[in-house]
Image: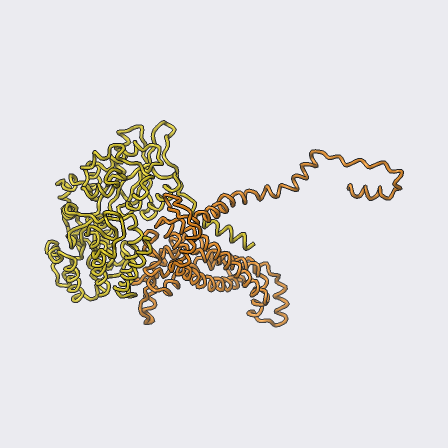
Chain colours: A yellow, B orange
Amino acid sequence: MSRRLVCSVAATLVVVLAAAGCGGGSSATSDGKIKLSIGLFSDFGYDNLIKDYQAAHPNIEVEQRKVKMEQHHTQLATQLAGGRGAADIVAIEEGAVAQFRASKDKFANLADFGAKDLKSQWADWKWNQGTTDNGDFVLGLGTDMGSLGLCYRRDLFELAGLPTDRAEVAKLWPTWADYAKVADTFTAKTPDVKFVDTSRNVYKAILDQTEEGYFAKSDDSFIVEKNDKVKQAFDQAASLGTKKQTNALEPFSQDWNVALKQGSFATTTCPAWSLALIKAGAGDSAAGKWDVTTAPGGGGNWGGSFLAVPKQGEHAKEAYELAKFLTSPDAQKRIFKETGNLPSQPSVYKDTEVTATINEYFNKAPVGQIFGSSADSLKPTYRGSKDSKVTPVFNNALQRVEQGKQPAAEAYAQALKEAQDAVK
Amino acid sequence: MTVLRNHTEAAVPAASVVPPEPPKRTWRDALGRWDGKYTPYLIIAPFFLIFGVFGLYPLLFTAWVSLHDWELIDGDQGFVGLANYTQLLSDSHFWNALFNTLSLFVLSTVPQLLAALGLAAMLDRGLRAKAFWRAGVLLPNIISVAAVALVFAQLYGRDFGMVNYVLGLVGIDPVDWRAETWASHLAISSMVMWRWTGYNALLYLAAMQSVPKDMYESAMLDGASRWRMFWAITVPSIRPTILFTVVTSTIFGLQLFAEPQLFDPGGTALGTGGADRQFQTLVMYLYEKGFRLFDAGYSAAIAWMLFLLVLVVALVNFRLARRIASKG
């Protein structure tokens, strides 16, 4: 009895490996319409746009499929591997795009449909992130972006004797070293409150302001041993952890929400899209307490997505047309007004309607202006195709420092060794 | 019938015998024979067909994949023989995951089965509202694991968790349940126990109810205590069920995934079972390698090692449990 039971149960586990994601691809519906599916995560704000598109194109029917972000990319990977099941249009997040760029054979080259003519719509860096082969292969069209700001609690700053006005706060930290000094002042005055939620995001913000991180822009080789920037970013972030100035939280987790609600930390790095998360976590009672200003070191980008067309779909041309429509300047402006997702196109984020936008909850901060100007000066860091293998290794190291399990130097040495193993 | 007739005819002198007419074989007989011979196979065939397609084929395919450098999306990158396995054997993360899996398995299964046994013994006594209590112990099992994990994650919260609050009342410093190895193992084990103790208790209860009552009566007449009756009568009588639960718990325990993965605030996208991988199980490592880092070949090798491990531990446990249970 035992053996068969063991076999069958163990086998079901193994099934997981072979099972590709399910769900039908595209097809013509019975009434002769072309059915297009679009695979998304979280809210892209496409509902109204799709309604309009269907009205203008009566032969097209669009179906949105939404899953959680962490499942979305895994599911897409298995669907690409299985050769079926992927939506006609799929969203790929900026952090994952390098990984999928390595498998570009599974995607349609949008340049074949004339995508290169659209290039001037986007900020250069955004366009480049979605292309490969020196710009000859267009993998995806850019959707929103995640300009980086820094959010802080006005009431806690006041308690620590720091200025609260966002322009003056910005003057406190032109660089990350200054940011660390503010942290020291803050901790000395209010030792019970942590200065920042997690050192990991500080690290990410610093590293994202350099041109190259773990990998060389020229040949995608692993360069951490040579690149002092990584070590510097790590040390700056880790020292916050060593001094117990961080709350050692997993960003955007349940505990993070609770800490927001309890006012356990005073600052957090905030990309445009995270304002909604902070508001949701901190709740209405904290309205006006949070504010947003420019990040030390001059901006950065975190997040934002691309719309790509997998080759396996039957209607690549029609899918491209829809993707083009959904990422057009008009569409991006409308999405910004409806959901607050920040446009990635200069003509839109410089539009007076966008720059004049303020966020009531964040003490009426002029978010359109803060995030828009930060986008303009942006030099995005190069992400290698193995970035996703290395990033968690350094994140874990920072967390070990925060948790007091390891001194910073030791944690870095271990991370470097693990990263070297991971990219072999 | 035929046999009987032949037998009586054998008594008649041979010379005068007309050779007996061979029994007439109708299509009905043929069908009956065929039916008796093959129908059982036909009836069990669907299981083996489905097992073949969804069990055996993936098993063999996984073995095939594990011998290759196999990228999840781009597929086969060339045959590498046993390289994935040799790399695995020198991979400290693999041994770490193996240790965590075994530790979590022991921490959750042993107390779980003992508690289930005790719970079943209580439920077996004359209780009021029997059906209520019996259905009640199964309740944790039918609640979605995601919901259970959500609740336990809050209970074991570092700063505002209820467990730490209660510990604080008796003067114990707050524990960072996710950061420390043993703390995280205890927390996850408690989640597993919460889900499965009732289920096993019901299995034991069902078995206990078929133990003949007169055995207890005669034991009582001999003046045996309840404790002694439990170990000398109840436990040996439900031996097959104990063996069953030990084997199934082993299989599920070694494949532990959902509870620790959901306990990890990093989730499947970022989580590695803690910053030190202090609660990463083998299946979590398999998932990380295969579905986050897209190294399907290596992941397949982990799957096969796990398969062999489950096989070995299940057999050992089967032997062990049979011996212990037959001692009574």
Q: Is residue A308 positioned above or below A184 on the image?
A: above
Give left or right: position of A371 versus A26: left
Location of residue A128 by image quarter: top left
Q: Which quadrant does the C terminus of chain B fall into? A: bottom right
- Is residue A376 visible to the viewer in this orientation of the structure? yes
Q: Residue at x 54, y 61 (%)?
A: B124
Picture coordinates of residue A213, whole percent (x, y) = 23, 52
Q: Is residue A83 positioned above or below A188 on the image?
A: above
Q: Residue at x 37, y 27 (%)?
A: A31
Q: Which quadrant does the N terminus of chain B fall into? A: top right
Picture coordinates of residue B113, whole percent (x, y) = 49, 62
Picture coordinates of residue B138, whole percent (x, y) = 47, 56
Count of residue discs: 0
Give left or right: position of B120 versus A223: right
Q: Is residue B182 positioned above or below A288 on the image?
A: below
- Is residue B190 visible to the viewer in this orientation of the structure? no
Picture coordinates of residue B304, whole percent (x, y) = 46, 53
State the residue in front, B134 or A233: A233
State the residue in front, A233 or A241: A233
